[in-house]
Image: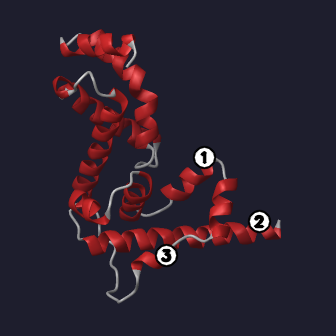
Amino acid sequence: MDRRLQKLIRKCRKHDRQAQFDLYQYCFDYLLAICFRYRKQREDAVSLVNDAFLKVLLNLDQFKEDKDFMPWIASITVRTAIDEYRREKKYREQTEFKESDHDFESAELNKEHWALVEQMNGEEVKELIHALPEPERMVFVLYEWEGYLHKEIAEKLACSERSSKRYLHRAKELLKKELTHKQALKKVI
């Protein structure tokens, strides 16, 4: 950890407001990139950054200086996004799935889909993922980006493992459909 960051953390622990602001500025871009995985609109992502950063400040005494600071605040930010999702879940209609014996693990993107994704720029990929419905996007990001298992996702999002698998399956199906559409458009052009 660099000296500037260590100094800021020490001052923040003493409730130095300028140091808190400077630490916020230091971490902002990093946290915003994480929050954009969970929020479509910049204002919503910034709000999530602010909520997460408040938790960082409130728990700064628990941070051990022999650890890396950025992964520590990243995990707080991810947990904050999950907590917010749970709160919002109460006010949203849940997507209904038909019960079936469908193998939810089989909705993998094929080589052509991944080749198309690799040709897209970061903004296009972000738009593609943000087009997913909220529950599907949350599970997709937690599973594919953050590396959580379905059991862990189910615990964090207060749903069943089966629901987590369904949301991931649905996310992949929607992504496949959109990528197939983009592939067809590319051939026409």
Give the structural element (helix, strand or loop) at label 2: helix
The residue nearer to you, when weighing 10 against 99, is: 10
The percent coordinates of residue 45 (x first, y second) are 40, 41
Q: Which numbered tag is attached to residue 183? A: none
Q: Viewer-nearest of labels 1 and 3?
A: 3
Image height of 13 relative to 147, above or below = above
Look at mark 3 in the image and give the residue it sits on: 107
Task: Name the residue at 21% across, 24% down.
Answer: 60
3 and 2 marks in contact (CB < 8 Å): no
The percent coordinates of residue 178 (x first, y second) are 60, 68
Residue type for callout 3 = Ala
Q: Which numbered tag is attached to residue 122? A: 1
1 and 3 marks in contact (CB < 8 Å): no
Answer with mark 2 or mark 1, whichever residue precedes in sequence: 1
Give the structural element (helix, strand or loop) at label 3: loop
Q: Quadrant of the N terminus?
A: top left
Task: Name the residue at 28% across, 51% down.
Answer: 82
The quadrant in which residue 142 appears is bottom left
The quadrant in which residue 162 appears is bottom left
Look at mark 2 in the image and give the residue it sits on: 186
